[in-house]
């Protein structure tokens, strides 16, 4: 197995929304805000080369939205999904599977693009199976008012129309389930229904792709929960459970949204689970 970090772009989000009830005087120490109260965010995806399979975990925002839409998220930097794939020697046609941790636009937008005439949409990865799970798919396609703006029809309906959409099984009475893609996933319901956190066995270590269960290093303290989470009290329990396991077993945590920290380990302290070490992906991959 080989792993490649894929930089699908950078953007900004409101720091207050990202930290919920935590005061700015506290969160700005780890996530400094600009003059508009926006903090740096990344869309850092992960490519898994495993035998004949090339599995992409998440795909960023994509580029099909309007300038007005992107204006809300202040894109910065020159990274893009396709250029990052090419940097590692891959083309979209090479991807065999796209695994979506969940279907908020900043995690799946890069899976679908405009067609050449801009009269409709088509898959970016024409040879890939597109993965979600049935419970989350229903949640995303019949959205509640809280999340409606995050589940975009132009991302979801074309996935179904391609015939490439597949579902991994949801766990019945446990948090972990085998995805059938060579790794397990931890299912979490606090941020959104049935978000999937991939757990990869790599060179004797477990690498966890943290998605929105742990957006940045600044979110390590258990009460530091995003205002975007639909069930924040459940997020507290899920984070506590997962981070204790991560500290016990020396997991490496791959941070999708932290613009400045790629990979971390955590440890038990008197204050709970906290940061142990930070790494660059190139230190391990």
Image (cartoon, grey):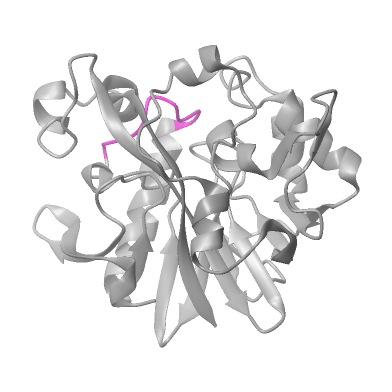
Residue positioned 81% across, 54% down in the render: 126
**Which residue appears farthest toward the bottom when viewing the image?**
204
Q: Nearer the viewer, residue 103 or 75?
A: 75
Q: Which residues are magenta?
A: 223-231
Q: Nearer the viewer, residue 122 or 242?
A: 122
**Relative to residue 245, is residue 226 depicted above or below?**
above
Whole-percent x and y of residue 146?
56, 17
Whole-percent x and y of residue 179?
68, 66
Whole-percent x and y of residue 75?
40, 29
Residue positioned 62% across, 37% down in the render: 109
Whole-percent x and y of residue 226?
36, 31
**Relative to residue 280, is residue 205 depicted above or below?**
below
- In the shown orientation, is residue 166 left or right of residue 220? right
- Quarter of the image for the C terminus: give it: bottom left
Please name the predominant secondary structure of the magenta segment in the image.
Answer: loop
Q: Nearer the viewer, residue 201 or 163?
A: 163
Q: Quadrant of residue 181?
A: bottom right
Residue positioned 9% across, 35% down in the render: 29
- Quarter of the image for the N terminus: give it: bottom right
- In the shown orientation, is residue 40 left or right of residue 109? left
Q: Is residue 11 magenta?
A: no
Residue 259 can be seen in this image: yes
**Relative to residue 164, is residue 282 depicted above or below?**
below
Q: Is residue 229 magenta?
A: yes
Residue 172 can be seen in this image: no
**Which residue appears farthest toward the front when viewing the image?**
117
């Amino acid at each position: 197995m080989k792993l490649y970090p894929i930089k699908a772009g950078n953007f900004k989000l409101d720091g207050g929304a990202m930290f919920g009830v935590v005061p700015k005087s506290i969160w700005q120490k780890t996530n400094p805000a600009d003059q508009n109260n926006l903090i740096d965010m990344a869309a850092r995806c992960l490519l898994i080369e495993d035998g004949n399979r090339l599995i992409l975990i998440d795909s960023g925002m994509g580029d099909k939205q309007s300038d007005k839409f992107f204006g809300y998220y202040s894109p910065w930097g020159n990274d893009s999904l396709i250029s990052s794939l090419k940097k590692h020697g891959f083309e979209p046609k090479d991807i065999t599977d796209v695994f979506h941790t969940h279907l908020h636009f900043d995690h799946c937008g890069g899976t679908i693009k405009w067609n050449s005439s801009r009269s409709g949409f088509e898959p970016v990865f024409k040879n890939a199976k597109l993965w979600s799970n049935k419970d989350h798919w229903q949640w995303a396609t019949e959205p509640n008012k809280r999340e409606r703006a995050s589940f975009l029809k132009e991302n979801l309906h074309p996935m179904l129309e391609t015939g490439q959409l597949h579902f991994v099984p949801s766990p019945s009475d446990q948090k972990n389930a085998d995805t059938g893609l060579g790794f397990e996933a931890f299912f979490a319901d606090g941020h959104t229904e049935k978000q999937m956190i991939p757990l990869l066995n790599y060179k004797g270590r477990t690498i966890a792709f943290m998605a929105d269960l742990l957006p940045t290093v600044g979110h390590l303290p258990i009460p530091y929960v995003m205002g975007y989470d639909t069930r924040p009290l459940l997020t507290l329990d899920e984070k506590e459970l997962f981070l204790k396991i991560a500290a016990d077993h020396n997991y490496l945590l791959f941070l999708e949204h932290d613009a400045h920290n790629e990979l971390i380990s955590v440890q038990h302290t008197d204050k709970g689970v906290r940061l142990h070490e930070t790494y660059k992906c190139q230190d391990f991959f």
